[in-house]
Amino acid sequence: MTAPCILLFDSGMGGLTVASAVRQAEPGATLIYAADNAAFPYGAWDEPQLVKRIVAVIGKLIDETRPDLVVIACNTASTLALAALRERYTVPFVGTVPAIKPAAEQTKSGLIGVLATPGTVNREYTKSLIHTYAFHCKVFLHGARRLAEIAEAKLKGQSFDPEELKHEIAPVFRRRDHKVTDVVVLGCTHYPLLLEEIRAVAPWPVTYIDPAPAIARRVSDLLRGAKSNGARMNGAAHGTVFLTSARGRGSESLAAYAAMGFSTNEVLDLPV
Protein backbone atom coordinates (compact mmCIF):
# COMPACT_ATOMS: atom_id res chain seq x y z
CA MET A 1 0.00 0.00 0.00
CA THR A 2 1.45 3.41 -0.94
CA ALA A 3 0.76 6.81 0.62
CA PRO A 4 -2.17 5.80 2.83
CA CYS A 5 -4.43 8.59 4.06
CA ILE A 6 -4.97 8.65 7.82
CA LEU A 7 -7.60 10.85 9.46
CA LEU A 8 -6.99 11.63 13.14
CA PHE A 9 -9.94 12.93 15.16
CA ASP A 10 -10.28 14.54 18.58
CA SER A 11 -12.48 17.13 20.24
CA GLY A 12 -9.51 19.49 20.39
CA MET A 13 -5.71 19.48 20.26
CA GLY A 14 -5.02 16.42 22.41
CA GLY A 15 -4.95 14.05 19.46
CA LEU A 16 -1.87 15.86 18.18
CA THR A 17 0.13 13.68 20.59
CA VAL A 18 -1.17 10.64 18.73
CA ALA A 19 -0.55 12.31 15.37
CA SER A 20 3.13 12.74 16.27
CA ALA A 21 3.48 9.05 17.09
CA VAL A 22 1.66 8.01 13.89
CA ARG A 23 3.89 10.33 11.84
CA GLN A 24 6.97 8.61 13.25
CA ALA A 25 5.56 5.15 12.54
CA GLU A 26 4.22 6.01 9.06
CA PRO A 27 6.39 8.84 7.67
CA GLY A 28 5.08 8.35 4.14
CA ALA A 29 1.40 8.62 5.04
CA THR A 30 -0.91 11.51 4.27
CA LEU A 31 -2.03 12.78 7.67
CA ILE A 32 -5.16 14.86 8.15
CA TYR A 33 -6.27 16.10 11.55
CA ALA A 34 -9.78 17.03 12.62
CA ALA A 35 -10.82 18.81 15.81
CA ASP A 36 -14.46 19.09 16.79
CA ASN A 37 -13.71 22.40 18.45
CA ALA A 38 -17.34 23.53 18.12
CA ALA A 39 -18.26 20.89 20.70
CA PHE A 40 -15.11 21.07 22.88
CA PRO A 41 -14.91 19.93 25.64
CA TYR A 42 -16.77 16.63 25.31
CA GLY A 43 -16.90 16.00 29.05
CA ALA A 44 -19.97 18.18 29.61
CA TRP A 45 -22.11 16.48 26.96
CA ASP A 46 -25.05 14.14 27.51
CA GLU A 47 -23.84 10.73 26.28
CA PRO A 48 -26.56 9.86 23.73
CA GLN A 49 -26.31 13.31 22.19
CA LEU A 50 -22.52 13.08 22.06
CA VAL A 51 -22.62 9.72 20.27
CA LYS A 52 -25.00 11.21 17.71
CA ARG A 53 -22.70 14.22 17.31
CA ILE A 54 -19.52 12.16 16.86
CA VAL A 55 -21.08 9.77 14.34
CA ALA A 56 -22.41 12.67 12.27
CA VAL A 57 -19.15 14.65 12.34
CA ILE A 58 -17.05 11.62 11.42
CA GLY A 59 -19.38 10.93 8.50
CA LYS A 60 -18.87 14.46 7.14
CA LEU A 61 -15.11 14.12 7.58
CA ILE A 62 -15.00 10.77 5.80
CA ASP A 63 -16.89 12.28 2.87
CA GLU A 64 -14.49 15.22 2.79
CA THR A 65 -11.16 13.42 3.23
CA ARG A 66 -11.69 9.87 1.88
CA PRO A 67 -9.32 8.27 4.42
CA ASP A 68 -7.96 4.73 4.36
CA LEU A 69 -8.09 4.62 8.16
CA VAL A 70 -9.53 6.76 10.95
CA VAL A 71 -7.86 7.17 14.33
CA ILE A 72 -10.21 8.28 17.09
CA ALA A 73 -7.50 10.02 19.10
CA CYS A 74 -9.81 10.72 22.02
CA ASN A 75 -10.59 8.47 24.99
CA THR A 76 -14.05 9.92 25.50
CA ALA A 77 -15.10 9.47 21.88
CA SER A 78 -13.57 5.99 21.70
CA THR A 79 -15.09 4.57 24.87
CA LEU A 80 -18.46 6.03 23.96
CA ALA A 81 -18.86 5.94 20.18
CA LEU A 82 -16.37 3.51 18.64
CA ALA A 83 -18.88 0.66 18.35
CA ALA A 84 -21.43 2.95 16.68
CA LEU A 85 -18.80 4.26 14.24
CA ARG A 86 -17.73 0.76 13.23
CA GLU A 87 -21.35 -0.22 12.71
CA ARG A 88 -22.08 2.83 10.55
CA TYR A 89 -18.93 3.15 8.40
CA THR A 90 -16.79 0.62 6.53
CA VAL A 91 -13.45 2.44 6.93
CA PRO A 92 -11.19 0.83 9.60
CA PHE A 93 -11.07 2.60 12.97
CA VAL A 94 -8.38 2.65 15.62
CA GLY A 95 -9.57 3.80 19.03
CA THR A 96 -7.92 5.19 22.14
CA VAL A 97 -8.75 3.66 25.50
CA PRO A 98 -7.15 4.05 28.94
CA ALA A 99 -3.96 1.96 29.11
CA ILE A 100 -5.08 -0.11 32.10
CA LYS A 101 -3.54 -3.38 30.86
CA PRO A 102 0.06 -2.13 30.47
CA ALA A 103 -0.25 -0.26 33.77
CA ALA A 104 -1.22 -3.47 35.55
CA GLU A 105 1.72 -5.23 33.91
CA GLN A 106 4.23 -2.55 34.95
CA THR A 107 3.22 -1.66 38.50
CA LYS A 108 5.37 -2.98 41.34
CA SER A 109 3.34 -1.55 44.22
CA GLY A 110 -0.06 -2.57 42.86
CA LEU A 111 -1.26 1.03 43.15
CA ILE A 112 -2.25 2.60 39.82
CA GLY A 113 -3.51 6.09 39.11
CA VAL A 114 -5.69 6.92 36.12
CA LEU A 115 -5.98 10.55 35.05
CA ALA A 116 -8.88 10.95 32.64
CA THR A 117 -11.88 13.12 31.89
CA PRO A 118 -14.92 12.77 34.17
CA GLY A 119 -16.81 11.00 31.40
CA THR A 120 -14.10 8.41 30.77
CA VAL A 121 -13.73 7.74 34.50
CA ASN A 122 -17.44 7.06 34.92
CA ARG A 123 -17.87 4.95 31.80
CA GLU A 124 -18.56 1.21 32.11
CA TYR A 125 -15.92 0.54 29.44
CA THR A 126 -13.21 1.86 31.77
CA LYS A 127 -14.51 -0.13 34.72
CA SER A 128 -14.54 -3.26 32.55
CA LEU A 129 -10.89 -2.73 31.63
CA ILE A 130 -10.01 -2.52 35.33
CA HIS A 131 -12.04 -5.62 36.17
CA THR A 132 -10.39 -7.58 33.35
CA TYR A 133 -6.77 -6.49 33.55
CA ALA A 134 -6.20 -4.84 36.94
CA PHE A 135 -8.41 -6.84 39.28
CA HIS A 136 -5.35 -7.59 41.43
CA CYS A 137 -4.44 -3.89 41.77
CA LYS A 138 -5.87 -0.87 43.50
CA VAL A 139 -6.80 1.64 40.81
CA PHE A 140 -7.40 5.28 41.70
CA LEU A 141 -9.56 6.94 39.06
CA HIS A 142 -9.68 10.71 38.82
CA GLY A 143 -11.85 12.70 36.45
CA ALA A 144 -9.78 15.85 35.96
CA ARG A 145 -12.05 18.70 34.94
CA ARG A 146 -9.43 21.22 33.80
CA LEU A 147 -6.42 19.27 32.53
CA ALA A 148 -7.48 19.22 28.87
CA GLU A 149 -8.03 22.98 28.86
CA ILE A 150 -4.69 23.57 30.61
CA ALA A 151 -3.01 21.42 27.95
CA GLU A 152 -4.55 23.47 25.15
CA ALA A 153 -3.50 26.69 26.88
CA LYS A 154 0.10 25.43 26.98
CA LEU A 155 0.04 24.47 23.29
CA LYS A 156 -1.21 27.96 22.43
CA GLY A 157 1.63 29.54 24.39
CA GLN A 158 -0.66 30.76 27.18
CA SER A 159 0.28 30.71 30.85
CA PHE A 160 -1.40 28.61 33.53
CA ASP A 161 -1.08 28.17 37.28
CA PRO A 162 1.21 25.26 38.30
CA GLU A 163 -0.69 25.03 41.58
CA GLU A 164 -3.90 24.32 39.67
CA LEU A 165 -2.10 21.57 37.77
CA LYS A 166 -0.77 20.14 41.04
CA HIS A 167 -4.30 20.13 42.47
CA GLU A 168 -5.71 18.40 39.37
CA ILE A 169 -3.29 15.45 39.52
CA ALA A 170 -3.10 15.03 43.32
CA PRO A 171 -5.95 12.47 43.70
CA VAL A 172 -4.06 9.69 41.87
CA PHE A 173 -0.95 9.94 44.03
CA ARG A 174 -1.85 7.72 46.98
CA ARG A 175 -0.15 5.91 49.85
CA ARG A 176 -1.42 2.61 51.20
CA ASP A 177 0.22 0.02 53.46
CA HIS A 178 3.67 1.60 53.11
CA LYS A 179 3.32 1.58 49.31
CA VAL A 180 2.69 4.43 46.86
CA THR A 181 1.24 4.88 43.40
CA ASP A 182 4.01 3.96 40.97
CA VAL A 183 2.21 4.05 37.59
CA VAL A 184 -0.10 6.77 36.27
CA VAL A 185 -2.17 6.26 33.13
CA LEU A 186 -2.64 9.37 30.99
CA GLY A 187 -6.22 8.60 30.06
CA CYS A 188 -6.76 11.57 27.75
CA THR A 189 -4.69 12.37 24.68
CA HIS A 190 -4.33 15.98 25.87
CA TYR A 191 -2.40 15.00 28.97
CA PRO A 192 0.96 14.00 27.39
CA LEU A 193 1.20 17.63 26.27
CA LEU A 194 1.67 18.44 29.96
CA LEU A 195 3.98 15.57 30.88
CA GLU A 196 6.98 17.75 31.70
CA GLU A 197 4.87 20.04 33.88
CA ILE A 198 3.10 17.10 35.57
CA ARG A 199 6.45 15.56 36.47
CA ALA A 200 7.55 18.89 37.95
CA VAL A 201 4.58 19.19 40.34
CA ALA A 202 4.06 15.50 41.16
CA PRO A 203 4.79 14.54 44.79
CA TRP A 204 7.10 11.68 43.71
CA PRO A 205 8.36 10.06 40.48
CA VAL A 206 6.13 7.51 38.77
CA THR A 207 5.92 5.78 35.40
CA TYR A 208 3.52 7.63 33.10
CA ILE A 209 1.82 5.65 30.33
CA ASP A 210 1.08 7.51 27.12
CA PRO A 211 -1.10 5.43 24.74
CA ALA A 212 0.18 7.13 21.57
CA PRO A 213 3.01 4.67 20.71
CA ALA A 214 0.67 1.68 21.02
CA ILE A 215 -1.93 3.40 18.84
CA ALA A 216 0.72 4.08 16.18
CA ARG A 217 1.75 0.42 16.19
CA ARG A 218 -1.88 -0.62 15.71
CA VAL A 219 -2.21 1.81 12.80
CA SER A 220 0.84 0.27 11.11
CA ASP A 221 -0.49 -3.24 11.64
CA LEU A 222 -3.83 -2.40 10.03
CA LEU A 223 -2.26 -0.56 7.10
CA ARG A 224 -0.10 -3.55 6.21
CA GLY A 225 -3.20 -5.54 5.36
CA ALA A 226 -5.24 -2.73 3.82
CA LYS A 227 -5.71 -1.46 0.29
CA SER A 228 -5.41 2.22 -0.52
CA ASN A 229 -8.62 4.13 -1.13
CA GLY A 230 -8.48 5.01 -4.79
CA ALA A 231 -11.49 7.30 -4.41
CA ARG A 232 -9.55 10.01 -2.53
CA MET A 233 -7.84 11.70 -5.49
CA ASN A 234 -9.65 14.93 -4.59
CA GLY A 235 -9.25 14.57 -0.84
CA ALA A 236 -7.59 17.06 1.49
CA ALA A 237 -3.85 17.58 1.38
CA HIS A 238 -1.32 16.22 3.84
CA GLY A 239 -0.96 18.44 6.89
CA THR A 240 -4.50 19.83 6.80
CA VAL A 241 -6.44 20.42 9.99
CA PHE A 242 -10.24 20.53 9.81
CA LEU A 243 -12.10 22.54 12.45
CA THR A 244 -15.84 22.36 13.06
CA SER A 245 -16.04 26.03 14.05
CA ALA A 246 -14.28 29.18 12.86
CA ARG A 247 -13.67 30.15 16.49
CA GLY A 248 -10.69 27.81 16.48
CA ARG A 249 -8.93 29.83 13.77
CA GLY A 250 -7.26 32.31 16.11
CA SER A 251 -3.60 32.94 15.49
CA GLU A 252 -2.55 31.08 18.67
CA SER A 253 -4.50 27.96 17.70
CA LEU A 254 -3.31 27.91 14.10
CA ALA A 255 0.29 28.42 15.20
CA ALA A 256 -0.06 25.48 17.59
CA TYR A 257 -1.39 23.21 14.85
CA ALA A 258 1.33 24.35 12.46
CA ALA A 259 4.02 23.60 15.04
CA MET A 260 2.71 20.04 15.19
CA GLY A 261 2.79 19.58 11.40
CA PHE A 262 -0.66 20.80 10.34
CA SER A 263 -0.09 24.12 8.64
CA THR A 264 -3.18 24.21 6.38
CA ASN A 265 -6.62 24.70 7.88
CA GLU A 266 -10.19 24.37 6.70
CA VAL A 267 -13.49 24.90 8.48
CA LEU A 268 -16.19 22.25 8.11
CA ASP A 269 -18.89 24.33 9.76
CA LEU A 270 -20.79 21.95 12.05
CA PRO A 271 -22.37 24.00 14.85
CA VAL A 272 -23.66 22.33 18.00
Image (spheres, rainbow, N blue to C red):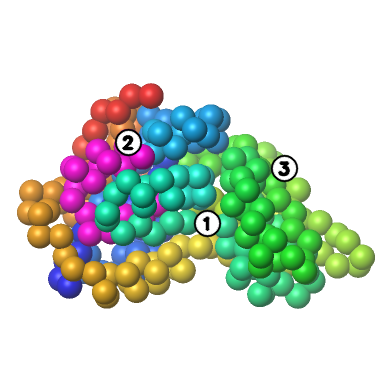
Q: CA distance from mark 2 to mark 3?
A: 36 Å
Q: Earlier in the sequence, mark 2 or mark 3?
A: 2
Residue at image mark 3? 167
The amino acid beneath tag 1 is: Val
Residue at image mark 2? 56
The answer to whether residue 190 shows anywhere in this view is no
The residue segment tinted magenta is: 55-72
Q: In the image, which disc is placed on residue 41?
A: none
Secondary structure of the residue carrying tag 2 is helix
Tell whether position 118 is magenta. no
Classify the position of the N terminus by image quarter.
Answer: bottom left
Q: Position of residue 134 (x, y in %)?
A: 70, 66
Q: CA distance from mark 2 to mark 1?
A: 21 Å
Q: Position of residue 71 (x, y in %)?
A: 36, 55
| Residue at x-position 52% and y-position 34% | 47
Q: CA distance from mark 1 to mark 3?
A: 24 Å
Tell whether position 63 is magenta. yes
| Residue at x-position 31% and y-position 59% | 92
